[in-house]
Amino acid sequence: MVDLEWYDDPRAFESDAQGFLASNALRATVISSMLVRLLAGEQVVAKTAPTPYWFAVQRDASGAPDGLAMRSGDWPPYLLDVRPDAARRLAGEVLARGERPGGANGTLASAQAFCERLIEEIGGAVHVERATRLFQVTHLVPPTGVPGEGRLARADEVDFCTDWFLAFHDEVGEAPTASRKEQCAEYRAIVADRTAQDCLWLWEDDGRVVSLAGARPAAFGFARIGPVYTPPENRGHGFAAAVTCLAALTIQGRDATPCLFTDLANPTSNGVYQRIGFEPVEDTVNLRIGAP
């Protein structure tokens, strides 16, 4: 049987998983960036889950970690390289803890096995909410001919940036895990943190903000960009490419490698990122449990 260990203490998880995180730093960006935020003192609130977060480590026959999982707040668990039998056991433990996640993200085979175990208990069927692709920068190619210029967001712009984070959330169609009021408060806190950390960039044209790109602080040498949002009325002018490139250049200047996830159903954004130097790494998936 695959050895699977559960952690509610991020420091204990870091101690045991750091070898895997370091050798899989890019592919583990979702887990490592959350870990770094928790270690820095960020608070996570769970409204339906019994604990605000957890981590899990899968070990091979020698005892070395070779797969990871985590859950943050009420978001679906994220599984990386967890073998199907271990993913099923993990889902069983999650259910035993009183959690009822609405799906899972990450490596397809891992997320699929996890969700299949869930529906044995709670019913429903597994659906692909979003197929995603992880990219990293190999050689940045700044776009040319884009009007305007970029800059870091200011503290007095938190409110309107929060509105754009919410608009991005609405546009990608992520299933809400909280009320609109709670979402606003959550995103406002995120925007305020990223602004204070110099991890939020704006593109201006003729004195008007036209596009936004955020990023998480670097974790194990990689900093994940997102969201990137341009209101519909501002699209088609290269603003998203320009502000993303600005974010990526800044990240490189901080001795980290930029990466990001794209929605495979959006060929426009995938093309934009590849044209400015992002190269595909691997595909992942967001699965949800819904009606059969």
Image: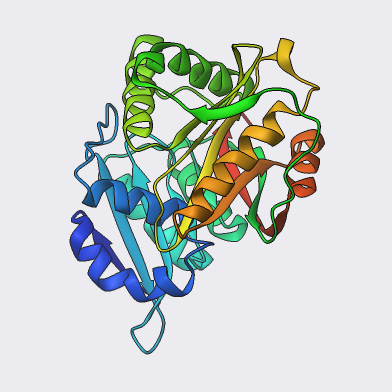
Place of residue 85 in the rendered image (x, y in percent of width and height, measured from the top left): 48, 67
Which residue shows up at 19% across the image and 44% down it?
Answer: 41
Which residue shows up at 57% across the image and 52% down it?
Answer: 259
Place of residue 87 in the rendered image (x, y in percent of width and height, measured from the top left): 46, 60
Place of residue 81 in the rendered image (x, y in percent of width and height, measured from the top left): 52, 66
Q: Nearer the viewer, residue 42 or 213?
A: 213
Compared across the picture, whether 276 is left or right of 61 comes to right
Instruction: Note whether residue 56 is visible.
Output: yes
Q: Quadrant of the N terminus?
A: bottom left
Q: Quadrant of residue 74?
A: top left
Q: Quadrant of residue 48?
A: top left
Which residue shows up at 25% across the image and 31% down it?
Answer: 45
Place of residue 117 in the rendered image (x, y in percent of width and height, measured from the top left): 48, 51
Which residue shows up at 43% across the image and 43% down it?
Answer: 216
In the rendered image, the vertical position of residue 48 relative to residue 226, given as above or below: above
In the rendered image, the vertical position of residue 261 relative to residue 201, given as above or below: below
Instruction: Note whether residue 91 is visible.
Output: no
Compared across the picture, whether 267 is left or right of 15 comes to right
Q: Quadrant of the C terminus?
A: top right
Compared across the picture, whether 31 is left or right of 291 comes to left
Image coloring type: rainbow
Q: How many numbered marks does the figure carry? A: 0
Q: Nearer the viewer, residue 251 or 91?
A: 251
Q: Nearer the viewer, residue 202 or 192?
A: 202
Compared across the picture, whether 139 is left or right of 98 comes to right
